[in-house]
Image: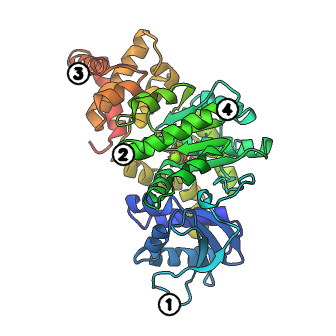
Amino acid sequence: MVANNHIEVWERCLQIIKSNVPDAVFQKWFVPVKPVSLEGSTLTIEVPSDAHMVKLEEEPLIDIMAKTLKRVIGDSVRLVYTIRFPKTTISYNHQTNFQATNKSIPIPLNPRDKDVINPFVIPGIQKLKINPNLNPKYSFDNFVEGTCNRLARTAGLQVAENPGHNPFCPLFIYGGSGLGKTHLSQAIGLKVNQLHPDKIVLYVSANAFQTQYMNAASGNKIIDFMHFYEQIDVLIIDDVQEFVSKPGTQSAFFHIFNHLQQAGNQIILTSDVPPGNLQGMENRLVQRFRWGLSAELLPPNYETRVKILKAKSANEGIVLSDEVVDYLATKITGSVRELEGTVLTLLAHSTFNREDITLELAKKVTKQIVNIDSSELSLERIRTAVCDYFKITPELIVSKTRKREIVQARQITMYLVRNLTKASLASIGSQMGGKDHATVLHACSTVSDLIDTDRNIRKYVSDLERQLKPGK
Ligand code: ADP
Ligand code: MG
């Protein structure tokens, strides 16, 4: 089949590749790839580094990619790479023509001067022109609002309207995996670009920043590196928890942070834990992360899950019946990424196997997704399940309220997380509304005692355990 939108096409390829490679391989080698364009049957993708391209070009990944691309784009497909952070100062294209027997390590072709994406090595006095690394798909328009993300979203909008001139510097967005940190931080960048085209916006993952720093350090280019970052008006660093235990990078970032802060520029950071939980991060940085606003992204509740399923399916051009939406929103309670994955899997079934999206198909697909993920229970998933079970909101369960039912639900959550995951007492406490480890321990022993003495509690806990770990 021939499709004509690069993002959509790459999304479809990812869906197929995902089911053919181990998850760790998928996360490491395919998730960082960004589709750039699709012209005829030539797909251009952007990869983070030279090494990344080499890895993709090796067996078995090249084989899987070739088969997938042929299936999605057609037999005449060609693949072109651009490198986001090349080792050399010039970015280049490398073309893979799957029709040729191309198994060798690639050689740089076609030096391109207009797409240089490692600009800190370019001397110059004029206003910096850089690729902000933003994906138009991650816009505010595509970001479904719910109680789970209202604070972060609203703050994000204010930041985008008045970057650097708002109380949220830095804006620190945190939450579990797949809850929208990357999407929201990119949406802010896109909106700034739209409202303030003169501002220099840069989105960079903490990993990419770290790699650039290492390259700069080994090439005696630290001054260029710092100088480059100090010119950015709106700097978005995604997944700052990656800086943990990397003192060199932390120190460089500390200086950049101070410079941007003093110049009245905007910094947006995301992390999978709140600032206080970044063990291995210098204290002076943690303190600065707390200066602005820390906003948590929580897992969506039922209503928001319905809204997300409807939005995602409409985007993909598929129609889901209310019955199917209700079923999926009830069963898939983890992250937005899981909801999105389900819609894409349903889309794949309906396009490749020409199946209608019936409740039966939805059940089959959900079973696969829920089964895969039940081996990796997360605090978010457990917290959502408890909230749904007791019909309370995620905000309430982490609030300070001492209402009996809420305290009970909170304690049951902590007990389940303690027993079903490897989370430490400290991290459970902090993600349950800033409690300390002693409070978590107390909650666990209270629930444990109640299970022996209170029939209702025993039933709640066993219902929830069955739902979370169906095989147990
Ligand atoms: P994180 O960075 O927190 O791991 P992402 O931002 O990558 O999560 O989100 C995972 C997927 O879910 C992305 O494809 C994103 O577009 C989608 N997503 C997350 N939150 C929302 C939302 N509120 N509305 C629509 N899509 C969302
Ligand atoms: Mg992310």
**Mark 2 or mark 3, which is nearer the start of the sequence?**
2
Please tell me which of labels 3 and 4 falls first in the chain.
4
Vertical side of 33 occupied by 447: above or below: above
Measured in 3D between alpha carbons, the distance from the residue under mark 3 to the one under mark 4, in whole angstroms, is 52 Å
| Front of the two marks 2 and 1 | 1
Residue ID for mark 3: 448
Q: Is residue 173 visible?
A: yes
Q: Label 3 to label 1, Cα distance in Å?
A: 63 Å
Question: Compared to 18, does 1 lie above or below?
Answer: below
Q: Nearer the viewer, residue 101 or 239?
A: 239
Reading the image, the residue beneath label 1 is: 101
**Residue beneath the point at 60% across and 74% down:** 92
Name which residue type carries label 4.
Answer: Gly
Label 2 or label 4, whichever lies nearer to me, is 4
Q: Quadrant of residue 183?
A: top right
232, 101: nearer the viewer: 232
Query: Looking at numbered disc 1 in the image, what kind of residue is underneath it?
Result: Thr
Q: Which residue position holds label 4?
A: 264
Neighbor class of circle 1 (other Cα within 10 Å; few <14, some 14-19, many 20+) is: few
> How many angstroms separate mark 2 from mark 1 (CA)?
41 Å
Mark count = 4
> Which residue position holds label 2?
374
Residue 236 lies in quadrant: top right
Q: Earlier in the sequence, mark 3 or mark 1?
A: 1
* C-alpha span from label 2 to label 4: 45 Å
Residue 100 in the figure: left or right of residue 1: left
Q: What residue appears at the point 63 percent right and 71 percent down from the top-left corner?
A: 44
Seen from the viewer's position, the closer of residues 358 and 401 is 401
Q: Secondary structure at mark 4?
A: loop
Mark 1: is the Cβ under 8 angstroms from ligand 1?
no
Q: Secondary structure at mark 2?
A: helix
